[in-house]
Amino acid sequence: MKKLLLLIFLIATVSLKSQQKIAFSFGETPQTLMLNPGSEINYKSHYGIPIVSNFQLTIGNTGFQMGDLFSNDSRSFNEKFEKVLDQISPSDYINLNTKIDVLNFGYRYNNKTYISIGFYEELDLIAYFPKDAIEGYIMEMILFLIDHFLFPKQL
């Protein structure tokens, strides 16, 4: 449970970069066809496994950095968390982008023709920080979880 909460928290605040731009350097992958349908293909066919063949996730925020919360100094996590909350302004936001392949396959019809079919789901979300809610009930709940599950006090 502790590890799951930490993983969710890290995913929510760390930017995982894997945008489509990287596919320009990988001519050997079938996902290149989504960016450039005219790219040269050297294989007979390809079949994408739904969700597994292409999954991208980007999460970022403008309010703080992970180093602000997990820096190695003498302050407690609670103090660091409260300082981060003080830094957040009404113009700071969270950005989420996901792209998941639903269907992707291709087949070489003859030496000159390669037929490729596919579609994917993409989600873009921008949300502003609910600072009042975080400072109130949500902050108390997060601090309780951190104190009792992530960093329990020794008896």
Image (spheres, rainbow, N blue to C red):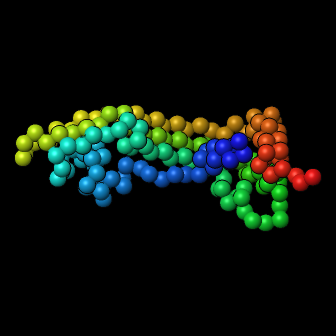
Picture quadrant where residue 5 is located: top right
Q: Which residue is at the far left?
A: 111
Asked whether 66 or 153 is in front, the reply is: 153
Residue 95 in picture, x, y percent from top left? 55, 43
Location of the N terminus by quadrant is top right
Residue 138 in picture, x, y percent from top left? 77, 36
Identify which residue is drawn at 71% across, 58% down: 70
Horizontal arrangement in the rendering, residue 149 relative to residue 94 (left or right): right
Identify which residue is drawn at 6% across, 47% down: 111
Q: Which residue is at the far front?
A: 155
Res 143 seen here = no
Q: Which residue is at the far bottom?
A: 73
Identify which residue is drawn at 41% across, 50% down: 19
Residue 90 in picture, x, y percent from top left? 68, 42
- Say if 136 sits above or below 17 in the image: above
Horizontal arrangement in the rendering, residue 129 relative to residue 50 (left or right): right
Horizontal arrangement in the rendering, residue 62 relative to residue 74 (left or right): left
Horizontal arrangement in the rendering, residue 109 relative to residue 128 (left or right): left
Asked whether 71 or 150 is in front, the reply is: 150
- Say if 119 sits above or below 149 in the image: above
Residue 65 in picture, x, y percent from top left? 65, 56
Identify which residue is drawn at 36% across, 55% down: 22
Please state the total of marks drawn on the protein image.
0
Picture quadrant where residue 46 is located: top left
Res 69 seen here = yes
